Image (cartoon, helix red, strand yellow):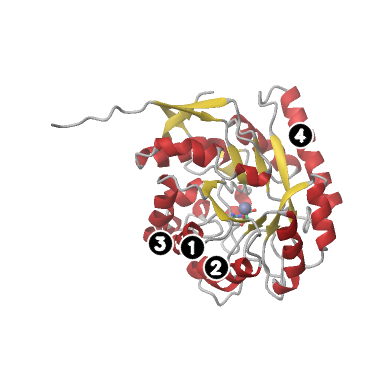
Amino acid sequence: METTVAKVNAVTIPRWFDRHLHVRDVDMLRNVLPCTLNQRAIGAVIMGNLKHPDETSTIEKAKGYRWRIRAMLGILQTFGVTTNKDFEPRMTCYLTDEITPEEVVRGFKEGVWCGVKLYMADQRGLGGTTNSGHGVKNLLGRYPVFEAMEREGIPLLGHFEAVEPEVDEFDREIVSVERDLDPLLNSFPGLPVVFEHITDGRAAAFVAEVKHNIQATVTAHHLMINRNEMFRNGMNPVHFCKPVPKREMYRLKVREYVTSGHRRFGAGTDSAPHDESAKMRCYGCAAGIFTAPTAVELYTTVFDEDGALEHLGPFLSENFLGLYGVKVSKETMTIERKPLAVPQKIGNVQVFRGGTELPWTLVG
Ligand code: NCD
Ligand code: ZN
C-alpha cells in the first residue's frame, strides 16, 4: 500500500538567533539592520571587522560599537521601521596580536563581548577575508590568551582558513583544520570553539566526530550553492564570499550533517553586505553574500527540500545558544508555505537570490 505523507504547510518554532552577522556601521547599519530585525531574530553575534582597523579589538572600542548599534535600534523602533523590541547585539572581541589575556577576560566578565573572533593574517598583514588584516599573525603567540579563555569558558569563534597566497583557495579550510585547529584543540581541550561558516565536508566531519567542545555555524548560501555558481554564465560577484563555496560533494556533506539534525551545527548567516561598487570590481571584488533580508526563508527552503523540517527549529533557534549566554526564546515565529519575492537590492546592496521567489514566507 502506498503511504502518503501530508505536506507540511506551516512551521512554528522559537524565535531564532543569528550566530554570525555583519551589520557594519553608520549608513550601512541603518540600511541592513532592519532586515535582521524584521526576520524576528532575538539577537545576533555581531562580527566587528569594520573598515577602520579592528574597531572591536579593545573593551572601549567594542562598547562604542555596541552603543552605535543600540542607538540605531532605538531610532528604527521610534520611527516604526521595526516592531522588534528586544533584539540583543552580542559583541565579539576582534583578536589581535596585541590584546592581553587580562583584557579579553575582563571584557567577557563585564559582559561587553560574548566571545573572541579569530581572523588570521599573514606576516605582511594580508588577511584572508574582508578587513581581517589586523587579525592574528602568530597563532602560537596567542596561546596565553587561549589558556585564559579555556579557564574562563570564553568561546573562540574561529575563521579557520589558511591565508598564505600559495595555498589553493578551495583547500584553505581543510589546511587550517589540520594545521591550526587540531593542535589548538589538543592544547586546550576545554576551550569552547565555534567553527565559523563551515563549508568543506571534510571540516564538517571533523566537527561532528572530534571529542572536543566544538560546534559550527553554517550559512544559508553555503547550504544552497556550490562553486559553480560563482562562474555560471560568466563571473557572479554576488556569489563570491569567504570561505568560497566548495565543490558539490563537500556542500552536500555539510548539508547532510545540518539537515539530519546534528546538534553541533547551528545557523549563522554571515550575511555580509557590500555596496555594489565594491562587488563590481574587475580586481579585488569584495567577499561577502548578503542574505539578511530572507535568511529564515532560505534556511526553511533547505530543510524542506531535504524533508527535514522537524530539525529546523533546533538549528535556527536552539543549538548551542547557551554558549553565547542566550536562552531559547519562549516566543515563537511561523513560516508558511507561501511564495516570497526576494528584493533585488536593499539600498545599494545586491541581495542573495534577489529577483527570484522563495517557497516560504515568515509570517509573524
Ligand atoms: C565577511 C565580510 O564581508 O565582512 N565576508 C565574507 O565573505 N564572509 C567577512 C568574513 O566573515 O569572512
Ligand atoms: Zn563573517
Residue drawn at point x = 78 percent, y = 50 percent: 108
Instruction: Report the residue marked by disc 2.
Output: 177
Assess whether mark 1 and mark 3 are in contact (beta carbons under 8 angstroms): no
Q: Element under label 2?
A: helix
How many numbered markers are drawn? 4
Regarding residue 362, the answer to whether it shows in the image is yes
3D distance between C-alphas at marks 4 and 2: 38 Å
Q: Is residue 216 above or below residue 171?
A: above
Ligand 1 closer than 8 Å to label 2 CB: no
Instruction: Report the residue marked by disc 3.
Output: 247
Residue in the foreground of this view, choosing between 168 and 154: 154
Q: Which image quadrant for residue 72?
A: top right
Q: Element under label 1?
A: helix
Q: Which image quadrant for residue 284?
A: bottom right
Residue in the foreground of this view, choosing between 59 and 284: 59
Q: Amino acid at mark 1?
A: Phe
Q: Nearer the viewer, mark 2 or mark 1?
A: 1
Q: Amino acid at mark 2?
A: Val
Residue 202, given in percent of the width and then of the height, sits at 45, 64
Mark earlier in primary sequence (2, 1): 2
Residue 72: mark: 4
3D distance between C-alphas at marks 3 and 4: 39 Å
Residue 51: mark: none
Mark earlier in primary sequence (3, 1): 1
Mark earlier in primary sequence (4, 2): 4
